[in-house]
Image (cartoon, rainbow, N blue to C red):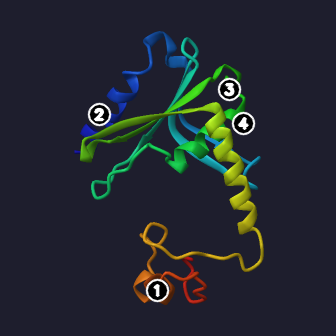
């Protein structure tokens, strides 16, 4: 049941957060990453800064059972980490991040660590790529991953032949 999966998520998160540290657990925390993307923000399911180790744990609940999600180089979670650094929520105490995916319907409880320097390097790459999207008629590249959830993919000639996607009829590209 849905309650069972929610409880598995909570049990996992609580295994990293000591009882005396629960006041430092942020739930549904809004983070801004405007230094990388204009008006960029997101909502982190939960995160906790362990001041004893300098590790910030970011927890992301995935309900889906069709595709296993990995925390390794997970751009969504890395962007959340950039937002936490920008927020000032104890960010001066963070030495590294541990990114966690909790996907109980697939028995996927996985984590991956990233240093501040590697995260900031990713942030610079992100900033450069976002800047490219601000150009009028910015190129859009069709591909398996980026078109996975597109409702227009079945009709996409660009996807079929692996060309730049310029589909005017598709609001999804």
Callout 4–callout 3 Cβ contact below 8 Å: yes
- The quadrant holding residue 12 is top left
Residue 86's disc number: 4
Q: How far apart are marks 4 and 2 (CA)?
A: 30 Å
Q: Which residue is drawn at 66% across and 19% down?
A: 93
Callout 1: 10 Å neighbours few (<14), some, many (20+)?
A: few
SS under mark 1: helix
Q: What separation in Å lies between label 4 and label 3 (alpha carbons)?
A: 8 Å
Residue mark closest to the camera, 3 vs 1: 1
For disc 3, the marked residue is 91
User: Which residue is more in the foreground, 23 or 93?
Assistant: 93
Pointer 1 or 2: first along the chain: 2
Question: What whole-number distance in Å separates the C-alpha atoms at marks 1 and 2?
Answer: 43 Å
CA separation, marks 3 and 1?
45 Å
Q: Mark 2 points at which residue?
A: 8
Q: In the rendering, at what x and y percent does residue 84 appear?
A: 64, 35
Asked if the residue at tag 2 contacts the one at tag 4, i.e. Cβ–Cβ closer than 8 Å, the answer is no
Dot 3: few (<14), some (14–19), or many (≥20) neighbours within 10 Å?
some
Where 36 falls versus 58 (above or below)? below
Q: In which quarter of the image is the N terminus?
A: top left
């Amino acid at each position: 049941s849905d309650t069972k999966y929610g409880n598995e998520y909570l049990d996992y998160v609580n295994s990293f957060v000591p009882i005396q540290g629960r006041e430092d657990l942020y739930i549904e925390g809004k983070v801004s990453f405007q230094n990388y993307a204009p008006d960029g923000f997101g909502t982190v399911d939960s995160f906790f800064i362990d001041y004893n180790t300098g590790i910030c744990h970011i927890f992301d609940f995935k309900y889906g059972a069709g595709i296993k999600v990995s925390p390794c180089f997970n751009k969504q979670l890395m962007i959340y980490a950039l937002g936490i650094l920008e927020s000032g929520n104890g960010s001066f105490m963070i030495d590294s991040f541990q990114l966690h995916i909790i996907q109980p319907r697939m028995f996927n409880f996985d984590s991956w660590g990233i240093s501040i320097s590697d995260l900031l390097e990713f942030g610079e790459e992100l900033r450069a790529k976002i800047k490219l999207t601000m150009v009028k008629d910015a190129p859009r590249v069709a591909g398996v991953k980026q078109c996975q959830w597109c409702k227009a993919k079945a009709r996409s000639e660009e996807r079929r032949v692996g060309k730049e996607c310029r589909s005017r009829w598709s609001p999804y590209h």
